[in-house]
Structures are given as C-alpha cells and as structure tokens.
Amino acid sequence: MLPIDLRSDTVTRPTHAMREAMNAAPLGDDTIGDDPTVAALEARVAALMGKPAALFVPSGTMANLLAIRSHTEPGDEIICHADSHICYYETGGYAAVAGCSIRFLTTPRGLFTAADAARLIRPDDHHFPRTRLISIENTMNRGGGVVWPMHQLADLASFARARGLRLHIDGARIWNASIHLGLPVADIAQHADTISCCFSKGLGCPAGSALVGDQPTIARARRFRKMLGGSMRQSGILAAAALHALDHHFERLALDHAHARRLADAINRIPGLSCNLADVETNLVYFEVSPDLCTAAEFCRRLEAVGVRTFDEGPQRVRAVCHLDVTESDIDEAARRIARAATST
Ligand SMILES: *Cc1c(COP(=O)(O)O)cnc(C)c1O
C-alpha cells in the first residue's frame, strides 16, 4: 500500500518535464551576475507582481528574512500575527539576524485590520522601539490557508502608507490566493512594498523562492543575501524549474483547491472529526480530532499506519495538504483510510 503524502505541498517531486526544462536551461554564474535563466526568472516574477525588481533566493525563510532586514534596522519593531510563518516557524531570525522585536496579533484566522495594527504602533518617543514594518501572510497557513479579502488588504496598505510603515506580504502561497480570488498576483502585490513567493510549494519545484519589490529595497536585499550565504552560482538550473512551473503548474492550483474541498467534506462526515468547511478556501485542510477519539499526534500515528501522512498542528488539530502529486482518486482513497483510522481503536 503506497502512502498518500498530505504532509505538505513541499513534498512534490519535480516532474519529468520539469527535469527536462532544468536540463535544457542555459547557465552562468549568478553571483558574478551572468546566469541568464536566473535573470529571466527574476524579470518574469517582477513583471508578474507588477514591481520593478525581484531576487531569486534558496528558500521562503530567506526571502522573508531579507525583506525584514532590508526594511528595518536593528532595534526596530515589526507588527505581525503570532501564527505567521515569520513569527512561528523561522527560528526567530527576525531577532537573531535582523535584530528586530515583534509586536504580534492573535486575531482569528490570522487576519487583522488596520485598527488592530493601529493599537500596536509605538508612539514616537525615545523610550520605544521604532515600529517600522507590518508583515502579513497570504494565504495564511495556520489560519487555514485563508485568503486576505482584497478590501481588508487595501485598507491595511493605505493605513501603513499613511503611518509611514512598510508592508511586507509573505506570499509563500500567493499563487493559491490569486487562483482563489481569480485575480492576477499583481493586483494583490500592488498593496505591498515587498512580497515573497515560493516555487517549492504548490508550484512543485525542488527549491527556490523570490523576494519582489522596488529597486533600492531589492538591491539592499541582494547585499544581505550575499552576507547570509544565499547567493548561488549555476542557480539557473533551479530558476528553470520555476519558469517551467509558472507555465505549467500555476493554473492547475484550482484543482488542488477542489481536492481540498472534497477531502474536507469527506472528513466532516466522519464521526469524531470535524472541519470548518468555510475556512477551506485553498489547498490546506485543517481538521479537529475529538478528544473522545484521541490526540492529534496519536491520530497522525494511526493515519500513518493506514497509509496517510499528515502533520499534527495543535493538540487536537491535524493538517492535510493537497498538491501536484495527489489525484482525485488519491483524495477519495485518503478519505476512506482516514475514516478507517477514526473507527479503529
Ligand atoms: C513554507 C513557507 C515559508 C517558507 O518556507 P521555506 O521552507 O523556508 O521555503 C514562508 N511562509 C509561509 C507561509 C510558508 O508556508
């Protein structure tokens, strides 16, 4: 029995066609500055996002860290959500490397308003750190993969601008937000000073992310990328995968979203499990395991035993992720196995 791997959309393997594209890519040395495929990807992503410049980096974590380091100076403060990736999953890089503190929000689903942010801005006083940056996540992973409503994002952006603050979007899954909204990524990115995006998630690449923004900010990020050891050489081989993914794996994200709704609906009909269907907007399915059944960690072990791989994301909360390497029939089979795990004792 082959396991169905729903741990993350990062587990996808490059397709044969993607490997061919990587194999065929013209290469140079990107640290010297002459890898044509990296240059082509950076130009393409900048254009897609409607921004002047883009920087190819090894990971989304580095893209976010470079954004933070480029927008701030040590001692500055960031406003973001407690459940955001930069706060929760990035080993405190904002503090350890960028020297920043965070004032965080704990609002539902990881979304917040300009009024919520306003309460966290420090007064202009020499006692306090300087509030410099608001960072949001779109889609919001720990919020359920939910998408920021456009009016709420526009409101927050004009508020940030009026208060002289920078706005960064952690857009690891901005592609999913774009597909969900039926809007070009540029319509979302226009509200931010910088946006990061990942090619290694739903788009199915083996590695690679980008940071996108204005020329001076991206030039500064390029220096910090070198400082952190993230400047690569024949990285066109990875950029080629990203170019291929933008051509072939972007529109199909709609399929992952349909699979997620199908899975969520099936899970919701299994006694002892529940899923808030309204929050399943993209490819992530978070569901609750009733304490009468077992803990989330125990349920993940049971799922592993029946051939479904997931992660526990809270004491009673499990995450299942739909991606390029799972078909509709895999989803139906996963739902049957999940039902079996919930009824076995
Ligand atoms: C995956 C992810 C990142 C970056 O992760 P890397 O593994 O460093 O590429 C950043 N933000 C969010 C919301 C993510 O899901």
Image (spheres, rainbow, N blue to C red):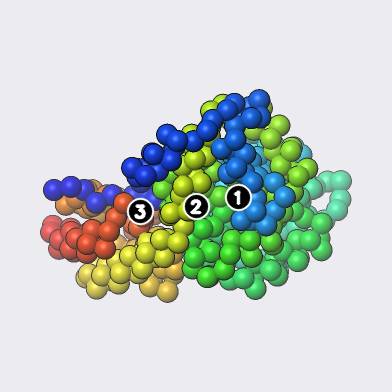
The label shown at residue 37 is none
Q: Amino acid at mark 1?
A: Val
Residue on which the image places disc 1: 45
Q: CA distance from mark 2 to mark 1?
A: 9 Å
Q: Amino acid at mark 3?
A: Leu
**Mark 1 and mark 2 in contact (Cβ < 8 Å)?**
yes
Q: Secondary structure at mark 3?
A: loop
The label shown at residue 246 is 2
Q: CA distance from mark 3 to mark 2?
A: 13 Å
The label shown at residue 324 is 3
Q: Which residue is rendered at x = 82% and y = 57% of the image?
A: 164
Q: Amino acid at mark 2?
A: Leu
Q: Residue 268's x, y, as percent? A: 28, 71
- Quarter of the figure with residue 154: bottom right
Res 261 visible? yes
Q: Earlier in the sequence, mark 3 or mark 1?
A: 1
Q: Secondary structure at mark 1?
A: helix
